[in-house]
Image (spheres, rainbow, N blue to C red):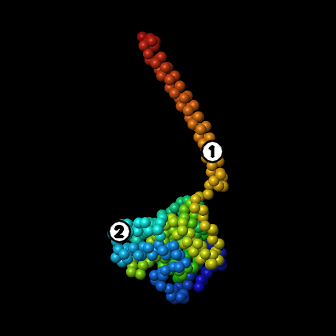
Amino acid sequence: MIHALSSRSTSPFSRASAVRIAPDSEAPSLPRVAVPSVALPRIEGAFRAVEMTLSSLGIDRPHTLRSPQVVEEALEGVSALEGTLVILDPAELRAAELDLEETVADERSGGAVFLSIPNPMEWASRRGRYRDIASSSATFAFIEPGATVKGFGKLVAVPRPRLIKGWRVFLADTPGFRVVVISRPRASGGFIGLWSGNSDLVDEMADFLRCAARDAGQDVPAAAAPVPPMIGVAGSAEVWKMAGELRGLREIREGELREIARAAALRGVAMRRERARTTGPMAKAPAA
């Protein structure tokens, strides 16, 4: 159940509006730890691969490890984690999230950003950053029950899907930068984080969140291109055409540079001759 504190608009977090999600007491009870997701098979497979590795190593509390090296070495070559870095340390997780946020904020290339943070207290400390991101990319925040968020500009709030309750999700679906940072809690403590640029994992989570936002009545951009758009380039034929033009320009420029170098060399010779004429033994001595 969602209570809107203002009339519905495409920007529910303008200065004069806010959205509140009903508290847990008004919502069905949900488990504290996420159950396996059949709707996200690739992501679930990645999490399962890490869980199985931790179990085989006898590691029950991975967040207490002084170094994740033993886990990283055991996970080498696991196909479910191709293009994905496993994170077990809270500081490393936040560093990955910040890297994603800063890249999107710096590039300002459009596309969409999806955010899901279980702790509502974290939103206030990031208001400025998320307002900035939402000014250039369509930004959707999946809010926990009981959370009220204000002053986020164009950022759009939607109810958090039941399937990912307790998960942290930071997903950038922007031209040339499609990356996701996902983490979910473990029953025995700690969490497993995935920092991935794998297109299969990114597409799976982006499609899931895009559908959730659309089901909530929001207009969501389509998936971004894997490479940034280039002005005047419509396909491979244009690339080859431009390459030929660039080669021609290079040859012209190289010819110009050779002429400049030749002129400089001739000028140097002339200067040396002039210096020799004025300072040589035949030069006229000054009057006494």
Tag 2: amino acid: Val
Label disc, if present, on residue 244 of the rendered structure = 1
Type of the residue with mark 1: Gly
Marks 1 and 2, the one that precedes in the sequence: 2
Which one is in front, 213 or 120?
Answer: 213
Secondary element at tag 1: helix
Q: Is residue 53 left or right of residue 41?
A: left
Residue extending furthest toward the top: 288
Rendered residue at 54%/66% (across/down): 199
Q: Secondary structure at mark 2?
A: helix
Circle 2 is placed at which residue position?
A: 70
Give the CA separation, mark 1 to mark 2. Answer: 51 Å
Picture quadrant of residue 69: bottom left
Q: Nearer the viewer, residue 121 or 85?
A: 85
Quadrant in the picture for the N terminus:
bottom right
Tell me where residue 251 appears, x and y as whole percent: 59, 38
Question: Where residue 98 sits in the image (x, y, percent)?
Answer: 47, 65
